[in-house]
Image: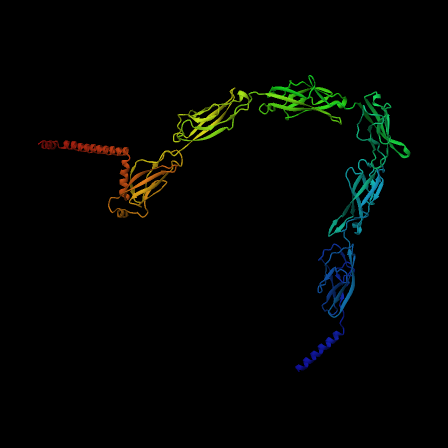
Amino acid sequence: MKKEKKTHALLFLLLLHFTLGQSDYAPHFYDNGPSSTSGNMALFSISEDTPVGTQVYILNGTDPEGDPVWYGLTFEKGSKEYFRVEPKSGNVTLIHELNREKQDELSMLVSITDGRNKVVETVRVFVTDTNDEPPEFQNLPFIINIPEDTAPGSSIYRVLAVDKDMGSGGSVSYYLQTSPFAKFTIDGNSGILRVKPGETLDYETTPTHFVTVVAKDGGGKYKGKHQVLTTTATITVNVIDAQDMPPSFVGTPYFGYVYEVSVPGSEIFTVYAKDGDQGNPNPIHYSIMNGSDGVFDINTTSGCITLTTFPSLLKNELYEIKVKASEIGPEDHLLDYDITIVTVRVVDLNNHPPTFYGENGPQSKFEVTMYEHPPAGEILRGFKITVNDSDQGANAKFKLRLVGPNRVLRVVPQTVLNEAQVTIIVEDSSGIDYEKGSTLSFKLLAVEIDTPERFSATADIVINLLDTNDNVPKFTSEYYIIRVPENSPGDSSVVSVTANDPDSGPWGEVKYTIYGSGSDLFSIHRSSGLISTQPWTSLDAEVRSKYNFYVKAEDSEGKYSLAEVFVTVLDMNDHPPAFDDKLLEKTMIIGTPVRVEAVDEDAESPNNVIEYSIMKADPDNAFDINPDTGEIQLKSYIKSMEIVQNITKQKDCKWSLVVQARDRGSPSFSTTAVVNIDITEAIKGRIISYFMGLSKRPLTVFGICVSIVTSLILLTICISTILYCSAVKKSRINPESNYIKVIRRVK
């Protein structure tokens, strides 16, 4: 029964499957409208500024049998893929940037499948515009050539800019970035550039203008924000010169000269004029209007003025010629003009150089004798100098100057016309110094100023100087430091000082003296400056090691200077070390050193530095001594009296040693002393040391004795007083007993 039921069920399922397989339908997309974001993307549009990675659409469809569906999206082979679809969800994502200006429509294939049936549709996606493109100027660069007489308000150029965007973002308007002094304006819609009304162009002032034009679109949205885009370009406006400026002479004022050797036809001067319209100049015509008196002519083309007669026939020394320069226009008509004056002077030849004169005629050397250091501003009246140039006018104009030690003297006048008396004045008195040189030499130079020949003349100026006492003796050093060994014999040379006085004769002779504390031990030679010790002087560093005094250098008129002398007496090793006594008694407590001391009366180290040593000892090898302090102590192995007694083999522990004290001078001196040392232990040693110490201090011992005697006397008085008081008391109580005692004592 069960098997039959199972068989029937299987047959039912097979029948059902067969029935369904015969009616399998293909899936399909849902319909979508123009603004729908779900369906098959038909009529879908997307903005070109959509960010990459944005989900822009959902492919959506169904299967009649309710089976699950999958979606696909492909582009034609070779074309760029802008979208990607997620097969299950149908979510479409933008994967590349869009640019409407390059591609405004995208064609692709979308598909839906249930695994058995697949539906493919071709769809077009429209890319919508945003304001992402700035205007672009056409026909760059903008270069304009216009005449300078262009009328105000005239149109001179039209600029054009194109914007690839659509709508308001693609519309273009224009304006200029101008200053308050701008010469141009532009129509905002048409882009026509004009000369601004009321303004004129001037080639001579500004031959080129640079105008910045801005093209601006109408604005629009981009990435959710409103933006306006602009582009700038430069318009170069070249102004073409027009004939509106008169000519003008160049290099005025004009001066010419006629010389005595000139001949008819000689060139006097050439004038030059140029058209003010430099961009398009006209030729120039020259002519003489008046002032030439018929003796001068001018070349109409070159402007060269020439002499027409001999200079000897000229009546005037000065001529002022009025010259006219005119523009030559069409058909050789003379147009605008300019006028100038040419001043012509008649001069002789420059054939005479300047000449110096003394009292007896021309002279090339002038000499004077004077004292040194004259005051600044003083005139050197010993010179009688005249200078002359026989030419006339500019040929007789020359400069005077002195060549020699700088700024010592100056000459007056410095500029001369024809003739002048020459004056020499002191400018720097310090430069006129006999000690620097007994003779000063200068060159007096006269040189023409404005002549091409530049004729000149020279004269020697010699000044012989007389000396004055203007210097003070001066030591070669401000101070002298001297070191003299002590015990130097009297009349020993110490140092030689030197002072110099550059004056001549007696003024330069120096005499020396010394004075000051300590100078009485020394003497100085008045002429040589040699300082020596007095014959009776004995220097001792232990008594005084420093001396300080002054040395004076004086000339014959009492002018002087001082130098300071510092004398150091050098210590010599002339004292040996000395102990207080040749035999020294010491008590040594075991473990405590004793000290010996020697004194060296020398003044300085190393002569007074002492070094101690043990020459010999009994017993031997029992003591050590500190070489610097003189401290004597037992060897380290001797630590008790038992060891001491074992060494000596007797109870008497008095040891002896010979100590040497040697100084460190050169040569070195030494002395010795015998030191007897009583070795003891700590307590006994202290008592012995105390009394040994007292033996060296008699005043202390005397004080102790007086104190003991005084104490005994006071004690006796106290006891006697106590006994007396006791006896008196008893006698009052029992006088008879006292009487009996007295009798008994008498008996």
Q: How is the rendered protein coloured?
A: rainbow
Q: Tell how many labels.
A: 0
Q: Is residue 614 visible?
A: yes
Q: Residue at the spot x=83%, y=42% of the render? A: 144
> Going by the picture, which residue comes out furthest to the right?
331
Q: Quadrant of residue 145?
A: top right
Query: Looking at this view, is 119 or 599 the one in front?
Result: 599
State whether residue 740 is above or below residue 423: below
Residue 381, horizontal then vertical, whole percent: 64, 18
State whether residue 233 is above or below residue 394: below
Left/right of residue 60 with respect to residue 330 in the rendered view: left
Q: Quadrant of residue 37?
A: bottom right
Left/right of residue 429 with respect to residue 173 in the rendered view: left
Residue 506, horizontal then vertical, whole percent: 53, 20
> Going by the picture, which residue comes out furthest to the top?
359
Q: Quadrant of residue 537?
A: top left
Residue 682, horizontal then vertical, whole percent: 28, 44
Residue 403, horizontal then vertical, whole percent: 66, 26
Q: Is residue 428 visible?
A: no
Query: Looking at this view, is 399 or 180 the one in front?
Result: 399
Q: Residue at the spot x=66%, y=19% of the render? A: 383
Left/right of residue 71 with respect to residue 681 in the rendered view: right
Query: Looking at this view, is 533 or 254 the one in front?
Result: 533
State whether residue 17 is above or below residue 160: below
Q: Quadrant of the C terminus?
A: top left
State whether residue 169 is above or below residue 385: below
